[in-house]
Amino acid sequence: MSFSPHAVINPPVVLSTGVQTVAQSAIGSAVDLSRLALPFRSAMLLDEIRFSAALVTGAEVPTVHNALFIQTKIALGRFAITDGFVPISVLTPSAQLAADAMMGVGIESASGRNSYSFLRWVFPVPLYVRPGEALGIGFRRITDGQTNTARIEASVVGRVVSGETPQPRSIRVPWVAAYVNDKVAASMSQGSGGPPNTALFNPFSSPLHIQRFVGRSYQDDDAGGLGGDLNDLVVGTGPDVKITDSRGFLVVGDPVVFGEVFDSTRHAWTAPHIMPPKGWVRVQFSGAGTNYVYWVGMVGWREEAIG
C-alpha cells in the first residue's frame, strides 16, 4: 500500500543545497546531505525541486543559456531518481517566458554580466522521505565555452508528515531519463531507446508510469559550447521527429516537426501512459541543420517497496 498524500500533515518546509560552484566540464563537490534532511526525526512529503543557476560573463558576452550546460543527478538512498546525470532543462516544461527561462535573466554589474536561469520541477507524485533520510543531489557542468565558475543551487519544497501517520510499505519514486544526442544527421539514423541505444528505457522490474516527454533543441556554436536555443525562440521549428516503442506502436508514425511534437510554448508533451518493465521509446530525427542538438527527457514514476 502506497503512502497517501492526503494523510495528516504539518506545515510546509523548504531545504536548500546552498550555492554550489562548478567549473566548466567538471562535476561539482558532493552536496552535504544534512542540508536536505530535517533537523528532527520526522518524515517529509516532497513536492518539487527548484533550481537556480548563475554565471558571471564578460560584459561584452550575451546572456548565457545556463539551463543548457547544467546537469543533475538525484537519488533517495538506494532509489535513483535520475538516470545518472541529466540536463536540468529536461526535468520540466517551460513555465516562464522563453528568453527568461532558458537564456537567463541578465543583470549588468561592475564585474560583468550576471546571467541567471531558473527552473521548477514539480514531481509527478509527492515523494515520501523517511525520517533521517534526504535527497542526494549532485551537479555536473558540460562544456559551454565559458571559463567562469557557475553557481548552482537547488531547493526541495515539501511538507512535514505528522508523527501520527504510519510509514507506508511502498512509495512512488519519480524517474527521469534523457536522450542527449550529438548533432543531428540528415536522415533517420539517430535515435534513443531500443537497440542500439537504451536512453528512454524502463530499467525496472515494475511498470513505469510516464507523465510527459520534454524536448529541447539547442544550437552548437562549433566553438566548444552551446549557442542559441532554437525551439524555445521559434514556433514550429526543428527537425522531423519519428517515435516508436518496444510494443511496436508508431507513437509518431509519420515524421512531425519537433516544435509540434514538443509544443513550442512548454517544450513538452503530456502523454500519460504505462511503460512495461524493460520497455522503451525510440525517438529519431531527420532534416535539421547539422549544428543543432536535440535532447528528449522522459518523466514519470514507479512504485518501490521500503519494507
Image: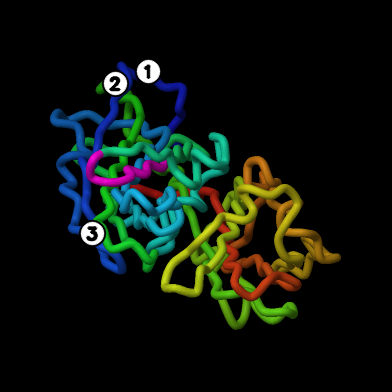
Q: Position of residue 91 (x, y in %)?
A: 49, 49
Q: Is residue 112 magenta?
A: yes
Mark 2 or mark 1: whose residue is earlier in sequence: 1
Q: Main secondary structure of the magenta part?
A: strand
What type is the residue that disc 3 sits on?
Answer: Gly
Q: CA distance from mark 1 to mark 3?
A: 37 Å
Q: Amino acid at mark 2?
A: Ser
Image position of 105 with respect to 192: above or below: above
Task: From this view, report whether residue 111 is shown above or below residue 255.
Answer: above
Residue lying at 22% horizontally and 29% vertically, measured from the top left: 42
Secondary structure state at the residue bearing disc 2:
loop
Q: Nearer the viewer, residue 185 or 250?
A: 185
Which residue is painted at 18% across and 46% down in the image?
33
Q: Which residue is painted at 43% across and 62% down in the image?
A: 83
Crowd class of label 1 (few under 14; some 14 to 19; many from 20; radius 10 Å): few
Indicate which disc residue 169 carries: none
Separation of disc 3 and disc 2 at Cα? Answer: 35 Å
Q: Assess whether mark 3 and mark 1 are in contact (beta carbons under 8 angstroms).
A: no
The residue that label 2 is drawn on is: 162
Say whether disc 1 or disc 3 marks the residue closer to the N-terminus.
1
Query: SS of the residue at dot 1?
Result: loop
Question: Dividing the picture into quarters, in which one does residue 251 lie?
Answer: bottom right
> What residue is pinned by disc 3?
28
Query: Mark 1 highlights which residue?
Result: 8
Q: Which residues are magenta?
A: 110-118
